[in-house]
Image: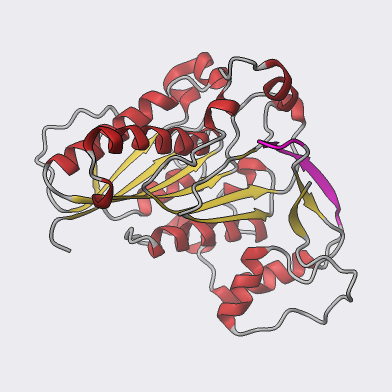
C-alpha cells in the first residue's frame, strides 16, 4: 500500500557465502522479488514505498576466524539493518521487516530484536514497524555448560541473545530446530529464547541435521524446510518467484510433502539433542513414533483436510519430533 515498505532480510550461517548458493538461505535471497540494498549499509538511492531486500553472508565469511568462533560481525550486520529501518521511518514510511536467519544468523535475528527495541525507544514509532522473524536452528556457538555455569558476566552470545521479551515490535516468530544432533563439542547446541507475550510464537522440531536441512537436494528434510520458509515469507508479505531452476525441485506440492512426512513417520530412529534454554534441561527429541511427525505435519494435514494415519494408541506421543524437559 501507499507509504508501506516490505523489507526482507536474509542472514546466512557462519561459513556460508551469499554470492554462491550453498544453502536455501542464499536461494531465497535470489527468489525474493525486491530492490536489493547493499549489505554494508551504504546506499545513495532514494528510499520510497515498495519491496526491498538485504542479504548477509555468514559472519565467518565476512569476519574470518573471530566471526566463526565468537560471531563477531552479527551486531554490525544488525546495525546495518537498523540503519535502513531508521531511514525508511525517517521518510514517514511504515515498515514490515521479514527476517530469515540460519544458525548464527538466527542468533542475529535475536540481536536484531534487541537493537529494534532500542531504535523504537529512541524514535518512539512503534506503530509503524513490525518485525517478523524466522530463526532456523539459532546456534550461538557456546558450549551449553560453559554458557550456563561459567558465564557470570553474561558476555557469551548465548546469554546475550536469550531474552528478547522487551521487544515491542515483534509480530510473528517462527523457530525451527532440526532434530538430528551434531556432537556438542562442535558448538552446535541451539538456543531456546524468551519472546514477548504479545507476539505470535511458533516453535517446531523439523527433520535433518543443522544446515543439512537447508541443502538443495530434494528430500523430506529439505522440502519441509523450503515449505516452511516459503510460507513464512509469503504469509508475511514478501514476494517470491519459486519457478527458478533450483527452487523448482524443492517447491513440492503440499500433497507430495505430506507423503514424504508420512514416510518419515514410519521410521523409528529415536534420538535427543541438547539445547540452551533459560531453564536447564531443555532437549529436542525424536520419539520412536507419533500421531504426527511434528507441528508442521499437523498443520499441513489440517490444510489438506486429511486425518493422520490410524491412531497409534493412547500411549503414543502426539509428535514424533518434539521438545522435552
**Left or right side of 144 for 234:** left
Residue stretch in magenta: 269-280
- On whether residue 276 falls in the magenta region, the answer is yes
- 80 or 120, nearer to the observer: 120
Q: Is residue 120 left or right of residue 4?
A: right
Q: Is residue 12 visible?
A: no
Q: Quadrant of residue 188?
A: top right
- Does residue 296 lie above or below 123 as drawn? below
Image height check: is 275 above or below 220? above
Residue 276, percent from left and from top:
68, 35
- On screen, residue 187 versus residue 173, left or right, reads right
Percent across and percent down for residue 325 are 79, 46
- Residue 146 vs residue 302, the one in the foreground: 146
| Residue 158 covered by magenta stretch | no
Task: Please tell me in which quadrant of the rendered image residue 114 appears.
Answer: top left
Q: Nearer the viewer, residue 291 or 120?
A: 120
Which residue is drawn at the image coordinates 51% and 14% (left, top)? 66
Amino acid at each position: 500500500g501507499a507509504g508501506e515498505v516490505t523489507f526482507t532480510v536474509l542472514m546466512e550461517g557462519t561459513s556460508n557465502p551469499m554470492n554462491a548458493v550453498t544453502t536455501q538461505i542464499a536461494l531465497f535471497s535470489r527468489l525474493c522479488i525486491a530492490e536489493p540494498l547493499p549489505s554494508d549499509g551504504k546506499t545513495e538511492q532514494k528510499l520510497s514505498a515498495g519491496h526491498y531486500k538485504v542479504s548477509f553472508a555468514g559472519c565467518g565469511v565476512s569476519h574470518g576466524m573471530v566471526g566463526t568462533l565468537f560471531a563477531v560481525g552479527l551486531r554490525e550486520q544488525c546495525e546495518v539493518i537498523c540503519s535502513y529501518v531508521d531511514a525508511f521511518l525517517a521518510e514517514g514510511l511504515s515498515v514490515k521487516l521479514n527476517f530469515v536467519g540460519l544458525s548464527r544468523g538466527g542468533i542475529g535475528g535475536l540481536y536484531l530484536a534487541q537493537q529494534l527495541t532500542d531504535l523504537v525507544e529512541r524514535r518512539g514509532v512503534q506503530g509503524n514497524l513490525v518485525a517478523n522473524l524466522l530463526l532456523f536452528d539459532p546456534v550461538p556457538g557456546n558450549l551449553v555448560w560453559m554458557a550456563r555455569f561459567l558465564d557470570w558476566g553474561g558476555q557469551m552470545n548465548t546469554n546475550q541473545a536469550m531474552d528478547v521479551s522487551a521487544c515491542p515490535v515483534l509480530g510473528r516468530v517462527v523457530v525451527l530446530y532440526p532434530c538430528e544432533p551434531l556432537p556438542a563439542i562442535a558448538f552446535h547446541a541451539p538456543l531456546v529464547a524468551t519472546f514477548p507475550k504479545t507476539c505470535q510464537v511458533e516453535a517446531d522440531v523439523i527433520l535433518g541435521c543443522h544446515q543439512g536441512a537447508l541443502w538443495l537436494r530434494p528430500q523430506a528434510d529439505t522440502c519441509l524446510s523450503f515449505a516452511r520458509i516459503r510460507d513464512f515469507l509469503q504469509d508475511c508479505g514478501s514476494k517470491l518467484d519459486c519457478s527458478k531452476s533450483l527452487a523448482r525441485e524443492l517447491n513440492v506440492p503440499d500433497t507430495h510433502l505430506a507423503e514424504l512426512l508420512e514416510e518419515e513417520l514410519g521410521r523409528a530412529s529415536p534420538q535427543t539433542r541438547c539445547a540452551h534454554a533459560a531453564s536447564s534441561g531443555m532437549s529436542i527429541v525424536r520419539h520412536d513414533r507419533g500421531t504426527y511427525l511434528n507441528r508442521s505435519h499437523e498443520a499441513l494435514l489440517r490444510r489438506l483436510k486429511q486425518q493422520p494415519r490410524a491412531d497409534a494408541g493412547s500411549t503414543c506421543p502426539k509428535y514424533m519430533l518434539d521438545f522435552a524437559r
